[in-house]
Image: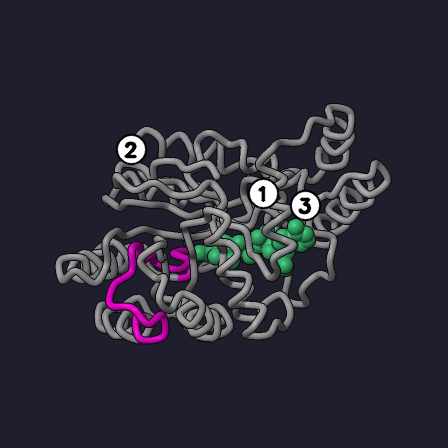
Amino acid sequence: MIYHPLGKTGVQVSTIGFGASALGDVFGAITLKTAIATVRYAMDSGINFFDVSPYYGVTLAEERLGNALQGRRHEVLLATKCGRYGYDAFDFSAATISRGLEDSLHRLRTDYVDLLQVHDVEFGSIAQIMEETLPAMRALQQQGKVRMIGITGYWPGLLARMLRQVHVDTVLNYCHSNLLMDDMDTELTPVATELGVGLINASPLHMGLLGGGPVAKWHPAPVVIKDAAAKIVGLCEEQGVRAPIVALSQCLSHTGVASTLVGFRSVAEIDEALLALEGVHEPELMRNIQKIVEPIRNVSWASGLAENQPATHSNSL
Ligand code: NAD
């Protein structure tokens, strides 16, 4: 495993991070036994960074992760989130942040988390998040319940603007830096690097599309993106290469990112991520993938309050 500094926090995170949303059955049901085996295998493979949220499976992912980490919690850096508690359930008030953390700690069977993040800032009032939510999280840090704090969300430009206005330790962006997208690097990566904020890249398979399995019913991508991802998967198959390995390999070679969070549902998926660490050297395949991606690169979908979305985002295709 390779480890990178998480911004200026002094903490070293594994380049492959464990995204635990899949433990909440959001990509299809798995058993508790599989969840526990997958988490323990990840730890034994050197993965030390685990990211979860009360939102994933509406508490199920936290429950299962807490169960799997029993007796070994201190071996990992544990990140959870606050402010989002269901598909449409957001509350960024100080009282809820504090109560929500207590509930998360209970489910995770621990008395502190390494990282507490505001979950999906674009769904809240940015003024409230900066003036009420983040100060409440700093207070929890003072109490020793949280080691570091961060923000997460879909829009890289919005996250970058927030970083310029408020001090946080980490920033997590999803679905904006992978085979299909690269605008995290134009809008957010330079700001995070300049400010020394730990950059976490999530959804390297575009929430499963580049894995080649069944697409989740809730997946918000426009059909042109789903079609392009399916073409990439087909092209890789023709060449005898696994698309998820190609996609993960590109993300894991990103030098500005501290950790790439992959949603794991099985030991076999962890093995593929470990293979991706070795890199993929298929220049012609990569050129052909680029040809598929070019017409739809950086096509996004609506997410969050209207006031927090870019004036023009390309979801019209
Ligand atoms: P992802 O792109 O990592 O895709 C996960 C899906 O891909 C799952 O269905 C998984 O079974 C499948 N998969 C994984 N490895 C595979 C392989 N080798 N072959 C085939 N399929 C494979 O998407 P994600 O889970 O949304 O993102 C990863 C993590 O990032 C999440 O679990 C979460 O922790 C974090 N995240 C955070 C936010 C946020 O804070 N706002 C948003 C999105 C994701």
Residue 291, image quadrant: top right
- Of all residues, the one furthest to the right in this rendering is 238
**Which tag is nearer the camera, tag 1 or tag 3?**
1
How far apart are the alpha carbons under marks 1 and 2?
A: 30 Å
* Relative horizontal placement of residue 285, taking residue 148 as reference (left or right): right
Magenta-drawn segment: 105-123
Specify few, some or many for label 2: CA neighbours under 10 Å numbering under 14, 14-19, or 20 or more: some
Specify few, some or many for label 3: CA neighbours under 10 Å numbering under 14, 14-19, or 20 or more: many
**Residue 225's x, y, as percent?**
70, 48
**Which numbered marker is on residue 195?**
2
* Label located before the other in sequence (1 or 3): 3
**Which numbered marker is on residue 244?**
3
**Residue 314's x, y, as percent?**
61, 45
Of the four image quadrants, the one with ligand 1 is: bottom right
Q: Is residue 112 magenta?
A: yes
Q: Is mark 3 within 8 Å of ligand 1?
A: yes
* Relative horizontal placement of residue 65, taking residue 280 as reference (left or right): left
* Relative horizontal placement of residue 111, taking residue 5 as reference (left or right): left
